[in-house]
Image (cartoon, rainbow, N blue to C red):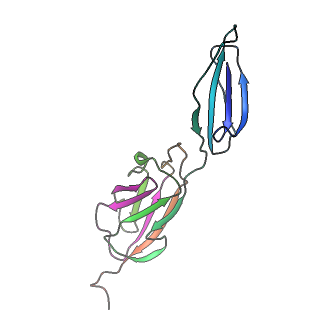
Amino acid sequence: ITFSLYYQNNLSLINETNYTSLTSFINFSGLVDTTYTYNVTVRDRANNQNRTEIRTISTDATAPRILAINPAGNSSGIPILTNFTINFSENITNTTLSNINFILVGSRSSNITAAFIYNTSNQTVIVPNIALSFNETYNLTLKAGITDRAGNNLSLTSFNFTTEVSPFDRS
């Protein structure tokens, strides 16, 4: 049995390993994040061979990052009926974006739950389930439980913002 691993669409052979047993385990740790192709060739004792079709695999060891959040961190005057748009560096596993991995808490209030709307696989809108309070500082935290499709965790990320002053308090 011969296992052949190629870098990006059969451009160059990275590894070719021959096995004599019927079952084998291959660990290619340390590969760079990219697309690879591979095939397996089996030869019997009479030198007859059978080759699999070429298969494609992709590796991903890069953790997702937040590219942008709107409203931006440390903003003030944010409307009390605001939604938050978050752009990630790569596709996020939608099931990991939930109230378990998201905390929105005000300086004078407890955790606020939210709904999550997936605009695209790398953009999410967070809609708080209640109006925020006027003139309050909030902290929005996204926990490391949020993952990309390869299972890489987002680093704990936190943003602060302050809501608008009540129209009845303005002088």
Q: Could you say which is closer to the camera, residue 157 or residue 4?
A: 4
Image location (x, y in percent) of residue 115: 32, 56
**Image: magenta residue range:** 115-143
Residue for point 39% across, 65% down: 84
Q: Could you say which is closer to the camera, residue 21 or residue 157?
A: 21
Q: State whether residue 27 is above or below residue 8.
A: above
Residue for point 55% across, 46% down: 152
Image location (x, y in percent) of residue 62: 60, 49
User: Is-magenta flag for residue 153?
Assistant: no
Q: Could you say which is closer to the camera, residue 12 or residue 125?
A: 12
Q: State whether residue 60 is above or below residue 27.
A: below
Residue for point 47% across, 56% down: 142
Total residue callouts:
0
Image location (x, y in percent) of residue 28: 68, 33
Horizontal relation, residue 90 to residue 40: left or right:
left
The quadrant in which the N terminus is found is: top right
